[in-house]
Image (cartoon, helix red, strand yellow):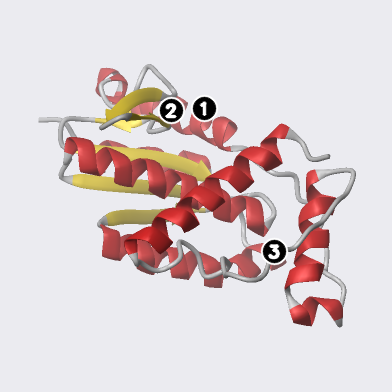
Amino acid sequence: MYDDALASQAKFLVAMVRQAILSGSALPSPNVFLSEPKYASGHSADQITDSLFLHTVPLARARRIRKLDRTVVPQHTADVRHIVFAEMRRIGGLHADRIISSERRFAVQDGERTHFLDIPLQTDKALGTIISTQYAARSAELQLLRADNDLQIAKRLYRQDRLLMYVVRGEPSVEAERFDDLLGDFRWKFSKLGVEMKDYSEPSLVAADVLEDMKIA
């Protein structure tokens, strides 16, 4: 059995792939590809995804997956946002509170469908999100995909002038270097879709850019 978090991630990816196939567009990630049905099991989300990878990717059968350095402690998106918001309020005062949304998630209606969007930065002319990618690579990729999906839905419904994504990726490390290619792929994709992506080594560095990018007249 797998946990609710993994089930939610799988459901999200399947929905994005289905939408891409129906619309005739490219698959949402360079790491998403189509194959015959595969099955995997395990006692945790990591065990299940590692098992599925070994059964799905031919080259993985010849060599074991190198594990993420467990000494690197993930910095979750919620924690990163808390630091950014505090710094925004410190240097921007009341101006910051006009940008930071009071609701972490809000519901929007798109025809007969209801979407719950996680977009913490909002003005009349721009929408922005802040995410951390200081996770294992597959979790970081899901963070990017979810953030982009929310921004694209909001763009279609509200048509703001700018879509902004602020990515906190941490200090340089071996794992960060491995993530560079994936981040580059997403940067290129986002630019084609009208999303401006900026990345930072520290959460506190994000605040000044947010205040400038989302300046309210």
The residue that mark 1 highlights is: 82
Q: Mark 1 packing: few (<14 Cα in 10 Å), some, or many (20+)?
A: few
Amino acid type at circle 3 is: Pro
Q: Answer yes or no: do the residues labelled 1 and 2 have beta carbons within 8 Å?
A: yes
Amino acid type at circle 2 is: Phe
Where residue 141 sits, quadrant-wise, is: bottom right
- Percent x, y of residue 31: 58, 68
The residue that mark 3 highlights is: 37
- Percent x, y of residue 117: 40, 32
> 78 and 91: which one is in front?
78
Disc 1, SS = helix
The residue that mark 2 highlights is: 85
* Side of 2 where 172 appears, left or right: left
* Side of 64 where 199 appears, left or right: left
> What residue is at 51 percent from the left and 27 percent from the top?
82
Amino acid type at circle 1 is: His
Where residue 157 sits, quadrant-wise, is: top left
- Percent x, y of residue 12: 54, 45
> What residue is at 42 percent from the left and 63 percent from the top?
21
> 40 and 156: which one is in front?
40
- Percent x, y of residue 66: 83, 68
Disc 2, SS = helix
